[in-house]
Image (cartoon, rainbow, N blue to C red):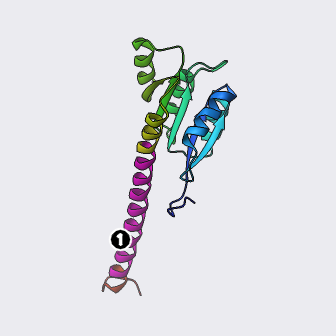
Amino acid sequence: MSLDGEQSVDILIVDDRAENLLALEAVLSSSKYRLIRANSGAQALDYLSTHDCAVILLDVQMPIMDGFETARRIRQQAHTREIPIIFLTAIHREDQYAQFGYEVGAVDFVSKPFDPRVMKSKVAVFVDLFRKAEKIREQEKLLSEASESRFRTIFEQSPLAIQ
């Protein structure tokens, strides 16, 4: 729970280099976020198989399964398809790599080293969207339950109801 009373949200950070994970944690450290580390694409997919998150910060250059393949697999799963992915890269700065990143599901492509203020702002936007979507889902559920209850009440009071 954050200081303002809101539930903290998970942010998945995926990088095979510990120093990059530490840098992201230092920049994004907040009671509003629960930062989840993954050292590989496989670890990220494993986490996402049982958890939800507001945004994924995903390194492009990783051994075994790179960020592009990880994103492609994330997009294949119905429950993770809509999670925003921000690619982070130190070497693939050419437009063709960014274009490919967008094609496999990225919402943004950021070069390292990144501006901490810009990174905070980008993440904050996706966290805000995630929270708003959660509120909409909660309201839809309450509305559905209220409609169902109202329908039952009307039906039970109907002369057609089986007594």
Counting from the top left corner in percent of width and height, residue 101 is at: 45, 21
Q: Main secondary structure of the magenta part?
A: helix
Circle 1 residue: 147
Counting from the top left corner in percent of width and height, residue 125 is at: 40, 43
**How many numbered dots are placed on residues in this image?**
1
In the picture, measured across the screen, residue 120 lies left or right of residue 38, that is left
Query: Which one is nearer the viewer's eye here, 48 or 94?
Result: 94
Indicate yes or no whether the magenta region holds residue 150. yes
At a point 40% along the width and 47% down the height, the residue shown is: 129
- The quadrant of the picture occupied by the C terminus is bottom left
Q: Quick one: label 1, few (<14), some, or many (20+) residues within 10 Å?
A: few
Q: Residue furthest left?
A: 159
At a point 38% along the width and 57% down the height, the residue shown is: 136
Dot 1 amino acid type: Ser
Q: Is residue 40 visible?
A: no
Magenta stretch, residue numbers: 126-154
Counting from the top left corner in percent of width and height, residue 57 is at: 53, 33
- The quadrant of the picture occupied by the N terminus is bottom right
In the picture, measured across the screen, residue 30 lies left or right of residue 127, that is right
